[in-house]
Image: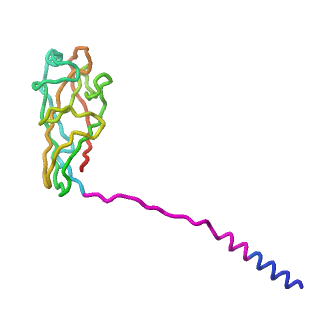
């Protein structure tokens, strides 16, 4: 009789062990995206130094805040290579410290006061809005050169005060 009770207890314990190993059904859902390859930024375009000539404060004060003139602009380019077939648009996003008064003007480590820079498309003259992808440029498979202008401007109604200009701006490219 003890043996029967022991056998029954072992069967019950084995049943408990099996039920502890069981779990609810579930599912896994893996998502992702496959994209075309993108263009490469040519090495000499990853750091683009633009040096302005010396300008008098009076010359800079001749433009309204957030505006520039041809005399205060310098051209620069970003070169792309190995753009694949199927990629037809390049967009740029510019990041850096912007003026609290004129949001399209970048400011930085300058000792010149009330002076900043604004970046525009060299073909259309359209000012590029900071911190957002835009300025769609049509590109072709292979190599492309994207041309821009950087111009000095005032950051407020205050008159520009002489000093050095040092405004770092980073860029990110996006392709469609």
Q: How is the image coloured?
A: rainbow
Residue 155: image x %, image y %?
A: 25, 21
Residue placed most toward the observer, 130 or 162: 130
Residue 150 drawn at (x, y percent) = 17, 31
Residue at 15% across, 43% down: 146
Q: Is residue 39 left or right of residue 26?
A: left
The residues colored magenta run 14-36
Which quarter of the image is occupied by the N terminus? bottom right
Quadrant in the picture for residue 37: bottom left
Q: Main secondary structure of the magenta part?
A: loop
Please say whether residue 26 is one of the residues in the magenta stretch. yes
Residue 84 lies, with reference to residue 64, above or below; the image says below
Position of residue 16 in the picture relative to residue 145 (left or right)? right
Q: Is 143 in the magenta? A: no
Percent across and percent down for residue 118 are 21, 29
State the residue lying farthest toward the right: 1
Q: Residue at x 12, y 31 (%)?
A: 74
Residue 31 in the figure: left or right of residue 85? right
Most extreme residue toward the left, as rendered?
A: 71
């Amino acid at each position: 009789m003890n043996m029967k009770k022991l056998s029954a207890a072992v069967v019950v314990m084995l049943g408990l062990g099996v039920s502890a190993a069981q779990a609810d059904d579930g599912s896994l859902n893996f998502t992702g995206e496959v994209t075309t390859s993108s263009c490469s930024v040519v090495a000499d375009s990853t750091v683009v130094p633009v040096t302005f000539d010396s300008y008098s404060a009076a010359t800079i004060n001749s433009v309204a805040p957030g505006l520039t003139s041809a005399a205060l602009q310098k051209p620069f380019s970003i070169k792309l290579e190995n753009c694949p077939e199927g990629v037809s648009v390049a967009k740029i996003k510019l990041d850096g410290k912007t003026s609290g008064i004129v949001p399209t003007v970048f400011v930085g480590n300058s000792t010149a006061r009330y002076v900043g820079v604004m970046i525009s498309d060299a073909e259309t003259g359209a000012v590029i809005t900071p911190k957002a992808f835009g300025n769609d440029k049509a590109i072709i498979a292979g190599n492309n050169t994207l041309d821009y202008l950087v111009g000095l401007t005032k950051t407020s109604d205050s008159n520009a005060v002489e000093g050095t200009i040092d405004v770092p701006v980073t860029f990110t490219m996006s392709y469609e």
